[in-house]
């Protein structure tokens, strides 16, 4: 799932469109909000210190002719792009933990939802 930080002055939609271009080389149509969740991530090198991150996940549509590929400015930990069926979500490393459940829930039309803390 493409993602990243929102730049100063960007709306959430502008940020989403930019991240999709950078990471999956796609011009997506934003269909709506799937869910919002809090994630608390440990700070590197600091014992018991966490930073809060708010996750916004949107329903999007890629063009019909889109082929999964990496964009020109992928995330530093991104190694590729691939389509994954809902049945195989548990076999990949989706973060934050619990994201597979939320993706399945969204696919069933159960959203938008505040998912609480992940």
Image: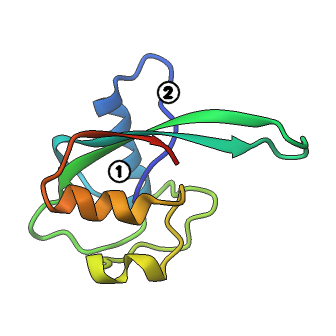
Q: Residue at x 47, y 60 (%)?
A: 98
Name the residue furthest front. 116
Residue 21 badge? 1
Image quadrant assignment for residue 86: bottom left
**Residue 118 image point, x, y percent:** 52, 48
**Residue 104 image point, x, y percent:** 27, 65
Q: Residue at x 79, y 41 (%)?
A: 43
Q: Nearer the viewer, mark 2 or mark 1?
A: 2
Quickly name the residue at label 2.
Answer: 7
Residue 72 badge? none
Q: Residues within 10 Å of mark 1 (few under 14, many from 20)?
A: some
Count up the numbered dots: 2
Residue nearer the viewer, 105 or 16: 105
Q: Secondary structure at mark 1?
A: helix
Say left or right for 66 vs 88. left
Q: Secondary structure at mark 2?
A: loop
């Amino acid at each position: 799932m493409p993602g990243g930080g929102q730049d100063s002055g960007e709306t959430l939609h502008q940020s989403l469109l930019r991240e999709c271009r950078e990471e999956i080389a796609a011009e997506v149509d934003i269909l709506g909000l799937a869910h919002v969740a809090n994630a608390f991530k440990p700070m590197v090198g600091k014992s018991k210190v966490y930073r809060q991150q708010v996750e916004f996940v949107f329903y999007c549509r890629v063009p019909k002719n889109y082929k999964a590929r990496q964009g020109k400015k992928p995330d530093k930990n991104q190694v590729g792009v691939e389509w994954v069926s809902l049945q195989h979500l548990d076999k990949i490393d989706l973060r934050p933990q619990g994201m597979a459940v939320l993706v399945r829930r969204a696919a069933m039309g159960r959203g938008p939802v505040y998912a609480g803390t992940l």
